[in-house]
């Protein structure tokens, strides 16, 4: 469903500045429920293609994916592993972020802010921030107060971060900096939702963060390219 809507936008069937059809019309067009339509629109938002404003509707803001990638090529086995792990993370971590927002304490916030700052410092030093990325997500798992979620994250260690499966020789350093700036912005959004104890916003921010990555790697698998 999301892929069909994406094609409508990227292939120019709906122009930039034009609103998507109403939920009711989309339901009739695709023969699906409103829930399915809403999930598809959420995914388009995470890809930077549309924005939704109360009282206005959902408007197309660009017709190409707002995406920068940092790798020239990825081993086929690695791409399969990355997609399988991201599928699992989408299920577990969206809930973990929601639980963290509802259950976190002051110690959790100190740990989260420290990991967020460490990511920023690593990126500023032009590092790939693999460990710092892992530490941020682990901090959320800890803040969820669910020992099984924490254990799930710890068993993978930093190998759960896709960048650990890509060798440095295949990485474009300039594109990497741009990519990591966006990752950092998404981490900040997740952090702020947890800080505000807004479970729904934390879940949505985490889902968008991980879905954007999943969509990009899935595109690579289909095309063997990020173009």
Image (tube, rainbow, N blue to C red):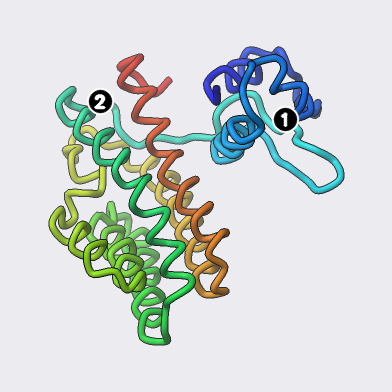
Residue located 25% across and 35% down the image: 84
In the picture shown, does residue 142 fall above or below 71?
below
Residue occupied by mark 2? 73
| 87 on left or right of 79 | right
Other-residue count near label 2 (Cα within 10 Å), few / some / many at <14 / 14–19 / ≥20: some
Residue located 41% across and 84% down the image: 105
Circle 2 — which element?
loop
Q: Quadrant of the C terminus?
A: top left
Q: Nearer the viewer, mark 2 or mark 1?
A: 1
Residues under labels 2 and 1: Cα distance?
31 Å
Q: Is residue 177 or residue 80 the one in the foreground?
A: 80
In the picture shown, does residue 118 fall above or below 84?
below
Circle 1 — which element?
strand
Residue occupied by mark 1? 60
Residue 59 lies in what quarter of the image? Answer: top right
Other-residue count near label 1 (Cα within 10 Å), few / some / many at <14 / 14–19 / ≥20: many
Give the number of the disc on residue 20: none
Residue 93, x across and y down, in percent: 36, 54
Residue located 46% across and 62% down the image: 98
As drawn, the residue found furthest toward the right would be 55
Q: Is residue 208 or residue 181 the one in the foreground?
A: 208
| 5 on left or right of 76 | right
Q: Quadrant of the N terminus?
A: top right
């Amino acid at each position: 469903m999301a892929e069909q809507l994406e094609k409508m936008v990227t292939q120019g069937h709906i122009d930039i500045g034009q609103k998507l059809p109403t939920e009711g019309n989309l339901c009739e067009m695709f023969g699906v429920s409103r829930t399915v339509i809403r999930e598809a629109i959420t995914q388009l938002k995470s890809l930077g293609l549309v924005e939704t404003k109360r009282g206005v509707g959902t408007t197309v803001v660009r017709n190409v994916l707002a995406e920068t990638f940092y790798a020239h090529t990825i081993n086929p086995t690695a791409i399969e592993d990355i997609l399988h792990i991201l599928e699992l993370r989408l299920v577990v971590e969206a809930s973990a972020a929601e639980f963290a927002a509802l259950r976190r304490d002051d110690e959790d916030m100190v740990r989260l802010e420290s990991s967020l700052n460490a990511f920023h410092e690593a990126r500023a030093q032009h590092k790939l921030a693999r460990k710092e990325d892992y530490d941020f997500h682990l901090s959320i798992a800890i803040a969820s107060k669910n020992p099984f979620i924490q254990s799930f994250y710890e068993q993978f260690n930093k190998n759960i971060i896709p960048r650990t499966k890509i060798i440095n020789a295949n990485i474009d350093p300039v594109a990497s900096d741009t990519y990591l700036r966006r990752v950092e912005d998404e981490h900040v959004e997740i952090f702020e939702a947890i800080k505000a104890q807004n479970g729904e916003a934390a879940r949505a921010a985490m889902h968008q963060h991980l879905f954007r990555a999943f969509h990009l790697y899935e595109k690579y698998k289909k095309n063997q390219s990020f173009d």
